[in-house]
Image (tube, rainbow, N blue to C red):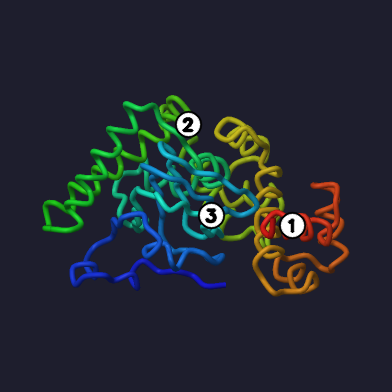
């Protein structure tokens, strides 16, 4: 599967030294997004007029005027069904753009719930107009960047994203609660994303974090509403769906890649969690994407 890199998306000389891009939303700029792919950067679509569909993992979102979609690095996605009157903006930016702990930690590592909830958002008319004004400023900086203006763009993108988070969560608990255990939850999510293929026990992650399994469960329940083992299993399921949808691997190859000791173990896991076999799940996903 193709992986798009922001550093290779060079449309002018200054792009080599910029951690963000802003383009008009049109067929030409969407051309490379019509087939399933991943990115190494964040991707935002803002719809001012017209409509399109964005396919993200096993979900399809219909975007129309007033809607905004934020896609996180490594999320498999593609665009379809664009209308002739489509108008809006595309914003790309690297994770390194974030300096603040709020966005660098919470936004990039909260990718069980926040990343999916930001895949399709709609703001009030007033908030949407304010977002368009912010994007206009960011685009102006992109077209005529300077050292100071680049810092202004970072600030504007942060404000824009925090507005989306607030629209989804009200005051999002992780942003509004500077609790002592917040860093532990962030570390757990980072460890999980790095090691889910090989380590699947709550005990492993608790030991790595130097806390008890009971404490880890309490923390995950507090910050994302699921137990630690649910978080581990959900992360594995996300990857199973990705590979069933978008890779050419056999079920045996997927099983061993994801740390199962046999295809039957993979089958048993999927059956227990989703009440269907990997073959049935693959057929279901294929029908969704080919509909």
Which residue is at the front of the view, 15 or 64? Answer: 64
Q: Tell me: 230 left or right of 53.
A: right
C-alpha distance separating marks 1 and 3: 17 Å
Q: Residues within 10 Å of mark 2 (few under 14, many from 20)?
A: some
Task: Tell me where residue 37 appears, x and y as whole percent.
Answer: 53, 66
Which residue is at the front of the view, 256 or 5? Answer: 5
Q: Residues within 10 Å of mark 1 (few under 14, many from 20)?
A: few
Q: Residues within 10 Å of mark 3 (few under 14, many from 20)?
A: few
C-alpha distance separating marks 2 and 3: 26 Å
Asked whether disc 2 touches disc 3, contact meaning CB atoms under 8 Å apart, the reply is no
- Looking at the image, is 233 positioned above or below residue 130? below
Q: Earlier in the sequence, mark 2 or mark 1?
A: 2
Residue named by callout 2: 168
Which residue is at the front of the view, 42 or 79? Answer: 79
Camera-side mark, 2 or 1: 1
| Residue at left offset 66%, top offset 70% | 247
Asked whether disc 1 touches disc 3, contact meaning CB atoms under 8 Å apart, the reply is no
Residue named by callout 1: 287
Task: Tell me where residue 190 appears, x and y as whole percent.
Answer: 52, 53
Task: Tell me where residue 157 appears, x and y as whole percent.
Answer: 29, 45
- Looking at the image, is 261 positioned above or below residue 208? below
Q: What SS does tag 2 mark?
A: helix
Q: Tell me: 100 left or right of 259.
A: left
Which disc is residue 278 wearing? none
Q: What is the quadrant of the N terminus in the image?
A: bottom right
Total count of labels: 3
Q: Earlier in the sequence, mark 1 or mark 3?
A: 3
| Residue at left offset 44%, top offset 39% | 67
Residue named by callout 3: 81
Task: Tell me where residue 285 appears, x and y as whole percent.
Answer: 72, 56
- Looking at the image, is 203 positioned above or below residue 66? below
């Amino acid at each position: 599967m193709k992986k798009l890199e922001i550093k290779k998306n060079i449309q002018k000389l200054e792009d080599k030294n910029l951690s963000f891009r802003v383009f008009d939303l049109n067929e030409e700029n969407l051309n490379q997004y019509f087939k399933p792919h991943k990115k190494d950067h964040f991707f935002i679509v803002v719809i001012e007029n017209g409509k399109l569909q964005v396919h993200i993992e096993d979900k399809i979102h219909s975007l129309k005027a007033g809607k905004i979609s934020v896609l996180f690095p490594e999320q498999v996605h593609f665009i379809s069904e664009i209308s002739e009157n489509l108008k809006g903006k595309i914003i790309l930016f690297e994770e390194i753009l974030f300096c603040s702990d709020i966005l660098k930690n919470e936004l990039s590592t909260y990718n069980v719930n926040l990343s999916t909830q930001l895949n399709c958002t709609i703001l009030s008319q007033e908030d949407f107009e304010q977002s368009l004004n912010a994007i206009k400023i960011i685009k102006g900086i992109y077209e005529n960047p300077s050292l100071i203006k680049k810092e202004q763009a970072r600030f504007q993108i942060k404000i824009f994203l925090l507005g989306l988070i607030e629209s989804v969560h009200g005051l999002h608990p992780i942003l509004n609660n500077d609790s002592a255990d917040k860093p532990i939850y962030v570390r757990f999510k980072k460890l999980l994303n790095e090691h889910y293929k090989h380590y699947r026990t709550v005990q492993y992650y608790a030991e790595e974090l130097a806390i008890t399994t009971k404490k880890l469960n309490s923390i995950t329940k507090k910050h994302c509403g699921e137990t630690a083992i649910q978080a581990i299993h959900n992360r594995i399921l996300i990857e199973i769906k990705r590979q069933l949808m978008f890779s050419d691997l056999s079920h045996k190859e997927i099983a061993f890649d994801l740390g199962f000791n046999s295809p039957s173990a993979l089958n048993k896991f999927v059956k227990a969690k989703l009440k269907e076999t990997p073959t049935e799940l693959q057929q279901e996903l294929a029908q969704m994407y080919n509909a």
